[in-house]
Amino acid sequence: MESQPADELLRDDLTGLPNGVLLRDRLRLALVRRRRPRDDSLAVLSVDLDGMTDFNRRFGRGAGDALLQAAAVRLSELVRAGDTVARAEDDEFVMVCEELSGEEEALVVAERVIEGFDHPLRVGDDEVAVSVSVGLVVVAGGELEPDRVLGEAHRAMLRARGEGPGRFDA
């Protein structure tokens, strides 16, 4: 049996983004940095593609995979180079944005993600309109565990999704 390079084990096979293991490690390191006195904040966004189940049912898994790949590219374009975009599971992505000036800048990031999906995604020869629901958690300090922060962001995303497509909740 051939072993995989370590980087491949930390990447999502479909999108090439960091997977849940690498996401938790990067978030853990970001939270460790939060323990030191700082003037900036950390934002964690849980991003869910609205209507993905219906899309897969209507167009098939292959088209759904292509849509996930296009969404991964779009999300990566919406953050700064040092931020992390990861595929958490299925059609849920997580963004970790460090060195924000505070909650107001984090809200701007969440709005930018929502607006980033105002334009259709290119999927093969087609353009597909899709919206996202976003949950936002802002961490300014403290001793939090990655799974707790991810859980809070996920619950905020579920609240946003409950309000209708293309929304965010903090």
Image (cartoon, rainbow, N blue to C red):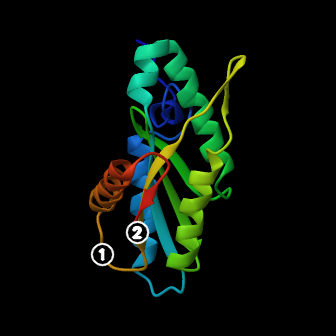
**Amino acid bearing label 2:** Leu
**What residue do we see at 29% from left, 64% from top?**
145
Residue 31's tag is 2
Reply above or below: 84 against 103: above
**What residue do we see at 39% from left, 61% from top?**
28
- Do callouts 1 and 2 mark residues in contact (Cβ within 8 Å)? yes
Give residue 66's position: percent from left, percent from top.
57, 22
Residue 153's tag is none
**What residue do we see at 45% from left, 58% from top?**
168
Give residue 148's position: percent from left, percent from top.
27, 61
**Image check: 40 left or right of 50?**
right
Reply above or below: 166 against 109: above
**Image check: 143 left or right of 116?**
left
- Residue 3 makes an appearance in the image: no
Sequence order check, earlier mark of 1 and 2:
2
Closer to the camera, 91 or 150?
91
Give residue 100's position: percent from left, percent from top.
58, 74
Q: What element carries label 1?
A: loop
**What residue do we see at 40% from left, 11% from top?**
1
Give residue 149's position: percent from left, percent from top.
33, 62
Q: Distance between the residues labelled 1 and 2?
A: 7 Å
Q: How crowded is mark 2: few (under 14 residues within 10 Å), some or many (20 or more)?
A: many
Residue 143's tag is 1
